[in-house]
Image (cartoon, grey):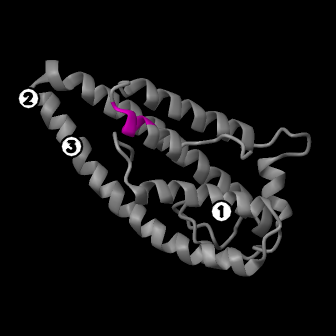
């Protein structure tokens, strides 16, 4: 799902999911969360489009490595590493969203499809803002927020390690898209 340079739309998708999770952890009105459900629908469609686009790019890596393994092979390995790390991070965020929804709406929440798809418009306990905090913060500060932040930091650091210092725009884009620093 990830490759070298992220488009602004890809950055927005990732950040919107983080913002939604943060808003759920705060005491935010149901109307604001309903607006996020509408935005989420559009972002989900965009996510599918980027998944398909990335599949084409990874296919091109595969073909290039098959034709010239010495030159393209190392790049394929890096691409596959980034893909795996991005998928792991995406799956972690999806799992957290499912946990939060199930804690609020129950194990058989209608907002979660049989395939694990999340339907934000079907979330029933949108105004129950204590549930996200239970998952993300935990009872003794042992919640999922710190491990998620660590996973994002690790992903960012690995990506930065793959980008040469002579590509400051790429490095800045990675830093900005995966920024986990606390606000001042």
Distance from disc 3 to disc 1, alpha carbons, whole Å, reads: 32 Å
Q: Earlier in the sequence, mark 3 or mark 1?
A: 1
Q: Look at the image and give the residue range highlighted in magenta.
A: 167-171
Q: 87 and 10: which one is in front?
A: 10
Distance from disc 2 to disc 1, alpha carbons, whole Å, reads: 44 Å
Q: Give x and y (percent) for residue 175.
A: 51, 39
- Dot 1 falls on a residue whose secondary structure is helix
Q: 10 Å neighbourhood of mark 2: few (<14), some, or many (≥20)?
A: few
Q: Residue at x 65, y 73 (%)?
A: 110
* Residue to which mark 3 is pinned: 59
Q: Which mark is residue 114?
A: none
Q: Is residue 129 above or below residue 170?
A: below
Q: Is residue 83 left or right of residue 22?
A: left
* Residue to which mark 1 is pinned: 20
- Dot 3 falls on a residue whose secondary structure is helix
- Pointers 3 and 2 in contact (C-beta within 8 Å): no
Q: 162 and 79: which one is in front?
A: 162
- Dot 2 falls on a residue whose secondary structure is helix
Please tell me whether the stretch drawn in magenta is mainly helix, strand or loop: helix
Q: Earlier in the sequence, mark 2 or mark 1?
A: 1
Q: Residue at x 24, y 46 (%)?
A: 57
* Residue to which mark 2 is pinned: 67
Q: Is residue 57 left or right of residue 83?
A: left
Q: 10 Å neighbourhood of mark 1: few (<14), some, or many (≥20)?
A: some
Answer whether residue 62 is visible to the viewer in this image.
yes
Q: Give x and y (percent) for residue 133.
A: 82, 54
Q: Is residue 47 left or right of residue 175?
A: left
Q: Earlier in the sequence, mark 3 or mark 2?
A: 3
């Amino acid at each position: 799902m990830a490759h070298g340079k992220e488009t602004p739309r890809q950055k927005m998708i990732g950040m919107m999911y983080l913002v939604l999770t943060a808003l759920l952890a705060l005491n935010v009105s149901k109307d604001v969360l309903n607006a996020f459900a509408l935005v989420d629908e559009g972002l989900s469609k965009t996510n599918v489009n980027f998944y398909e686009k990335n599949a084409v790019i990874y296919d091109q890596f595969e073909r290039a490595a098959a034709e010239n393994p010495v030159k393209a092979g190392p790049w394929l390995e890096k691409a596959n590493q980034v893909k795996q790390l991005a998928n792991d991070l995406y799956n972690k965020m999806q799992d957290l969203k499912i946990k939060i929804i199930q804690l609020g709406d129950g194990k058989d929440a209608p907002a979660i499809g049989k395939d694990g798809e999340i339907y934000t418009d079907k979330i029933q306990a949108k105004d129950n803002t204590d549930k996200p905090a239970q998952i993300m913060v935990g009872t003794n500060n042992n919640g999922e927020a710190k491990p998620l932040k660590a996973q994002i930091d690790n992903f960012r650091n690995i990506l930065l390690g793959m980008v040469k210092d002579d590509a400051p725009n790429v490095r800045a884009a990675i830093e900005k898209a995966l920024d986990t620093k606390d606000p001042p």
